[in-house]
Image (cartoon, rainbow, N blue to C red):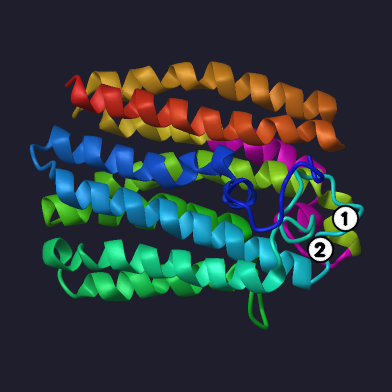
Amino acid sequence: MMNAVKTNSIRAWMLASRPKTLAAGSVPVLVASALAAHFGQFKLVPAVLCLLFALLAQIASNFSNDYFDFAKKTDNADRLGPARAVASGWISPPSMLIGTAVVIGLACLFGSGLIYYGGWEMVLVGALCVVSLLAYTAGPWPLAYHGWGDLFVLIFFGLVAVVFSFYVQAGSFGPLVFVAGFIVGLPAVNILIINNFRDYENDKACRKHTSIVLFGRLFGKWLYLINGIAACLLCLSFAQESAWAAILPSFYLLFHYRSWRKMCVIWSGRELNILIGESARNLLILGLLFAAGLLMA
C-alpha cells in the first residue's frame, strides 16, 4: 500500500482521516438527535451543524495525532497498527500541520452556526474541544501519553458530544441526556482500548503511558468487556421513556461479545487491527438500536 499511495494525494488524506473510526464522531449526534426527537425537540439545522463539527473535529484530531506521534517517534518500525500517513511518507509533516489547521478552521466555521441555537457559550465549548483535541498528543504534557486518553474519549466523544448536540436542539438538558452520553462514550473508548492493547509493547518502549501500559493487558481485556455491558445496562434507565430504547440495545451485546472473544484469542500482533473497525461498527450498531428505540416510543 505504501507504494500505491502518492504523497499528499487525496487518497493519502482519506487514509489519514481514518474513516473506519468516524462512527465515534457521528453516533453521539445521532443519539442526541433521536433523544431530541423523542421529546419533540428535533431541529435539523443544528443537528447537521453538530454532525459536521464532530466529524471535522475528529478528523483534525486524527491528523494531529498522526503528526505528533511521528514527531515523538512513537510511530516507528515496531508499531503494529495500520500505517500512519506521515510515518509512511504519504503526507509530509508540514502538510499535515497545515491540513490539521485547515480542518480545525472548517470545524470552527460550521460550529459557529451553533451560536444562534445555543448562545455564545458555544464558543467556549468549541474552544475547549479544539484545545483538548490538540492536547491529546501535542504540548508538554500530552493526555494520551499520561494515561488520560480513555477519559478524554469518554468525555468528548460521549458526554460533551451528546449533551451539547441535544442542547442546541432542545435548549436544555437533564440527567437522562448525561446517561445517553455515557451510553455512547463507553463503547467509543473501546476503539482506543484496542489500539492501546495492540501497541502495548511499543508504547511501553516509547514511554507512552496509556492505561494499558499503566495497568496491563488484563486490565484492557476486562475494561473492553465491561464498557459494552455497562452501556447496555445504562440503557435500562430509559425504560420509563421507552421500553424499546431499554431492550433493543441488548442485541449489541452479541457483536460486542464476539469482538471481545476475538481480542482474547488474538491477544497480540497486527491481527488485532481488524477489531478497530469491528469496535467502531459495534458502536454504530448500539447507537442505531438505541436511537431506533427512542424513536419507536
**Residue depicted at x 63% and y 69%:** 95
Q: Which residue occupies the foreground of this view, 27 or 4?
A: 4
Q: Residues within 10 Å of mark 2 (few under 14, many from 20)?
A: many
Q: Is residue 146 visible?
A: no
Residue range corresponding to the magenta coloring: 206-227
* Image quadrant assignment for residue 11: top right
**Residue depicted at x 51% and y 55%:** 59
- Tell me the tag on residue 74: 2
- Local SS, label 1: helix
Q: Amino acid at mark 1?
A: Asn
Q: Which residue occupies the foreground of this view, 297 or 292?
A: 292
Q: Which residue bears the numbered disc 1?
A: 202
Q: Which residue occupies the foreground of this view, 205 or 273?
A: 273
Q: Residues within 10 Å of mark 1 (few under 14, many from 20)?
A: some
Mark 2 near mark 1, Cβ–Cβ under 8 Å?
Answer: yes
Residue 146 relative to residue 149: left or right: right
Q: Which residue occupies the foreground of this view, 12 or 259?
A: 12
Residue 267 relative to residue 127: left or right: right
Residue 65 relative to residue 82: left or right: left
Residue 154 position within the rendered picture, expressed as x and y whole percent measured from the top left? 49, 53
Residue 204 position within the rendered picture, expressed as x and y whole percent measured from the top left? 87, 60
Residue 114 position within the rendered picture, expressed as x and y whole percent measured from the top left? 20, 62
Q: Is the residue 143 above or below the residue 90 in the image?
A: below
Cα distance in 3D space between marks 2 and 1: 8 Å
